[in-house]
Amino acid sequence: MGDLKGHVALVTGASQGIGRACALRLAKAGATLALAARNQQKLAEVCGEITSAGGQAAVFKMDVANEDEIKSAIKAALSQLGKIDILVNNAGITRDQLILRLKRADWDAVLNTNLTSAYLTIQQVLSSMLKQRWGRIINITSVFGRMGQVGQANYASSKAGLIGLTMAIAREVASRNITVNAVAPGFIETAMTAELPADFKENALKLIPLGRVGTDEDVANAVAFLASEEAGYITGHVLNVNGGMLMG
């Protein structure tokens, strides 16, 4: 699916989980990868996986909660790789707590990391996309951004905000042949979900018609599709990857 040779893709949170899977999948399709995250050691490992398979990748340290690091990392990526024409905003955190106990610091941390960072990265890469009149922006949101979740007012708000951001920017840049879409994973087996209580996982599984949790590759395949030429007439869309957990 989709020949991405000649394209440069920046993936945030690329050191593990869904971000790593997206980076590997885009590299498999032929894209050159700009790998961004805080953990340079893990990024180097992902970079090694890509290059050992015959792909091209470079590592850029980026804490998406730090505006200066976002700007400097993207500036370095543009300088080294020449352009960025695919952006995957994947980096995210959780700070779960019931609303009556939710601290302002935990609200701010989640909103800044999950939502504000996407606005900042998009702003920094758009010039490159506008110049060549081609681009793909893919924001990783969540099923809980559409249906909510107990104890995740901050997380659900940030992911719902990503959906609104996706649609607004899709309208702004469509005339320049730049598409902006979101992928909304459901319950995916990652390091983040591995820490959830066993009873939570069991209850979540009961809500999934396909009868299994998703994999990071399931999400990566959706991202690769939206990055491809085949998805050129899709923009402002939220693609659910949730096994039927939420329909419609």
Image (cartoon, rainbow, N blue to C red):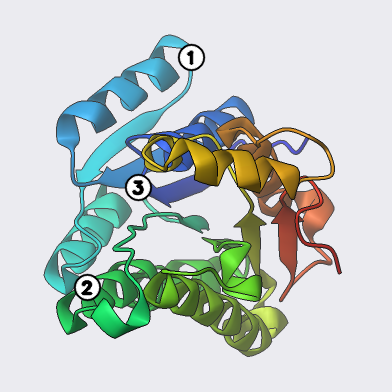
When asked about the image quadrant of residue 191, the answer is top left
Q: Establish if 104 lies above or below 92.
A: below
Name the residue: 30% across, 84% down: 100
- Secondary structure under tag 1 reads loop
Of labels 3 and 1, the one closer to you: 3
When asked about the image quadrant of residue 153, the answer is bottom left
Residue 31 at least partly seen: no
Residue 54's label in the rendered image is 1
Residue closest to the far front? 199
Q: Residues within 10 Å of mark 1 (few under 14, many from 20)?
A: few
Q: Amino acid at mark 1?
A: Gly
Name the residue: 75% across, 54% down: 245
178 sits to left or right of 194:
right
Residue 12 at least partly seen: yes
- The CA span between labels 1 and 2 is 41 Å
Of labels 1 and 2, the one closer to you: 2
| Quadrant containing the C terminus in the rendered view | bottom right
Name the residue: 18% across, 38% down: 39
Q: Which residue is mark 3?
A: 13
Q: Which residue is mark 2?
A: 106
Query: What x and y, as percent, mark residue 111?
Result: 33, 76
- The CA span between labels 3 and 1 is 22 Å
